[in-house]
Image (spheres, grey):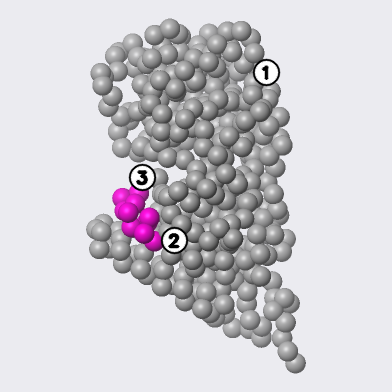
Amino acid sequence: MEQHEHDVRPSVYFWPGYSRSNPYTDLLYSAARSTYDIGAGTIRDALSALSAPGPKRPRVIFHLHWLNEITANAKTRDAAEQSFADFLNDLALFRERGGRVVWTIHNTLSHDGRFRDLELEMSPIITARSDVLHFHARSSVPEVLQVFPFPVERAVISAHGNYAGVYRDNGLSQNDARAALGIDPGDDVILSIGFVRPYKGTELLLEAFRTVMRDRPRLRLIVAGRVHGGVLPDIVPPLTRSEMERITVTNSFVEPERLQYYLRAADIGIYPYRSILTSGSLLLALTFGLPAILPGVGMVREVLDGYDAGITFPHGAGTGPVSSAIAALFARKDEGTLGQMSENARKRAAQLVWPDFTPILDKALG
């Protein structure tokens, strides 16, 4: 008797598996888990699953997210080239044996990657060996096409959702949150939260902070997160003592239950990324009602335009536009309308529920 593939529950192996420190994958797959067996795994784990013993042929999807892990252990360029070659060979073999590949393109190129030219060379090959290319915003498709080619007919859109219910939220008032963190209730507080790496534009943020502080001496900057490299990048001229006194750097991982204190204590959130395609940090800020400042790439504009929940500045801009964006939001605070922006942010986040990812996986299986 002929065996039917659809009697077998399909499997999804997503990689890299960052779910312990990032709830993104749990949220992305929340609805799809009713139909698919989903777990973290490498391309070789997915290959092994295709060979699992049983009376029926397994249906297996390998879902690639970020490319940086491919060369994470490579110390030399030769080692990086070999890591890419091994990965591409495994990917080709996986598809030859009946596996299907989905790639969520989070970035045009990996942030702070050591071998970006290799990644640029390999990305079109990976897209050619993918059955579905997933983007979180329609406007991200042409942005990526400017960096490397891919088969546009394989592109699908499934938006990035909010973080409602993910992190502890006791509905703290701003004053209570500030009291818990030792922040003066009269301060003008800017928050940059998350792991601090060069691509996040910390140097640009410090320069903009310094500029705005000349007119707002009660300005305070909180950089909440573990810092990669030095505690703060060098800027010219160096930060003065009075400027340093207005900057708080935790230089440690912010525990999930503590996130609410920083997000509630701040007036505005800022993420002046040097490189960005999609921003989960924006959705986190909006979820907590925090108006945000980010580069105006397509995904950010799709979220913010027309909702008065934040401000964008031109991607790749210097200090001036970022300083102007900060000053504009604090002008809203002075006139008493920043609270309305905060409410707009919460309402916008509530609209951005996570779509069911099942149709994307179904499309990959054909």
Question: Tag on residue 26?
Answer: none
Among the 4 quarters of the image, the one containing residue 160 = top right
Q: Is residue 148 visible?
A: yes
- Main secondary structure of the magenta stretch: helix
Is disc 2 placed on a helix, strand or loop?
A: helix
Amino acid at circle 2: Pro
- Tell me if I can see residue 250 in this picture: no
Q: Which amino acid lies under the numbered mark 1 shown in the image of this protein?
A: Gln
Residue on which disc 2 sits: 124
Q: Which residue is mark 3?
A: 112
Q: Compare residues 281 and 52 and report the one nearer the observer.
A: 281
> Residue 122, position in %: x, y?
39, 61
* Image quadrant in which the C terminus is located: bottom right
User: Marks 1 and 3, how far apart in space?
Assistant: 36 Å
Spot the residue most to the bottom.
1
Question: Residue 82 location in percent, x, y?
Answer: 31, 67
> Cβ–Cβ below 8 Å for labels 1 and 3?
no
